[in-house]
Amino acid sequence: MVIGIVENLRGSYEYANKALHSFSDWVILITICLLTLAGAVLMAVGLFGFIAASMEAIAPGSATLFPESIPFAGVVGAFSLAALCIGVIFTLIFSILWTGFILRVYRGGELKLGSWGGMFLDGLLATIISLVYCIPYIVISVLLMFGPMDNAAFVLGSMVIRFVVLLITCMVLIMALIRFAKEQRFGAAFQMKELFNVIATIGWLRYLGNIIVVGVVLLIICVILLVILVVGWVLLLVVMPLLTIWEAKFFTNLYESAVAASAPAVLEE
């Protein structure tokens, strides 16, 4: 029988609360999260500055940030491009490490940091898997762009199609990454028959309900902390490893219970 939502929320939280035995591991995870966030901010600032500087260089006076001279816009553009590149590198490296850590939660066993090369490789492979899964959504989105965009019905329909494709992609991708983590084989993430059997055992609507519930619970916690200025933001950063482990374990429990529930049927066949 597939695990219930309430039982799963409670069990995965208890696991997350006891998963990290080392205070230093917690600090390292917070640091990785902070560096990922810093990279994203630097990337956004660099992109904005580069676009503004480019506009000013092409059409002087078009960017109000640089009203005085084109050379100044060029200097800002160079620094902005450097910031953009550094931000991209930081974001990629530390987000890949973070993803590698999540895969360790998926895999199960004692949760501890170390073997950084292996964790980075796991995160990199998981990122590649995610990009592959996004290909159908990207292709469909591009094809829909060639439709009659002045037709309101078509625009609305294309938005619905893209949303449904993205939703299904995310639902399958979560199970694919868990399977990849447990099997430790790249190809395991693309065993579509097995993945759809797992989801069918859970039930598509029930699976969607699980995603919504855990998403709402975590969102409420984040919003409560975000509205508490400064202190709440710091607390959110501190508890981010806990929330990440909680969510990852929630989906792992769902996957494992579905595999266990479908095992008798497989044996009978």
Image (cartoon, rainbow, N blue to C red):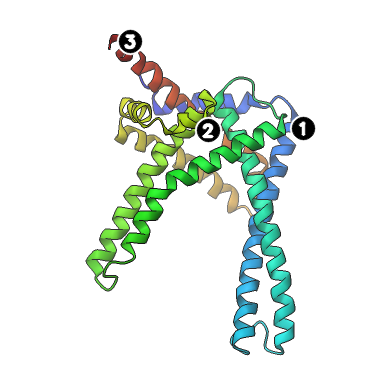
Percent across and percent down for residue 50 are 64, 72
Q: Which amino acid does label 1 sit on?
A: Ser
Q: Which of marks 3 and 1 is in front?
A: 3
Q: Which amino acid does label 2 sit on?
A: Ala
Which residue shows up at 67% across the image and 45% down it?
A: 94
Query: Which of the two residues, 257 or 73, is positioned nearer the viewer here?
Result: 73
- The mark nearer the N terminus, 2 or 1, is 1
Q: How far is the residue under mark 2 from the one under mark 1?
A: 21 Å
**Picture quarter containing residue 269?**
top left
Q: What residue type is labelled 3?
A: Leu
Report the residue marked by disc 1.
24
- The mark nearer the N terminus, 3 or 2, is 2
Mark 3 neighbour density, 10 Å: few (under 14) some (14–19) many (20 or more):
few
Percent across and percent down for residue 46 are 66, 67
Residue farthest top in this picture:
268
Numbered label attached to residue 248: 2
Kind of element beneath mark 1: helix
Percent across and percent down for residue 257 are 41, 20
Numbered label attached to residue 243: none
**Looking at the image, residue 114 lies above or below residue 228:** above
Numbered label attached to residue 267: 3
Q: How far is the residue under mark 3 from the one under mark 2?
A: 28 Å
- The mark nearer the N terminus, 3 or 1, is 1
Q: In which quarter of the image is the N terminus?
A: top left
Kind of element beneath mark 3: helix
Query: Which of the two residues, 73 or 9, is positioned nearer the viewer here?
Result: 73
Which residue shows up at 62% across the image and 43% down it?
A: 96
User: Pointers 3 and 1 in contact (CB under 8 A)?
Assistant: no
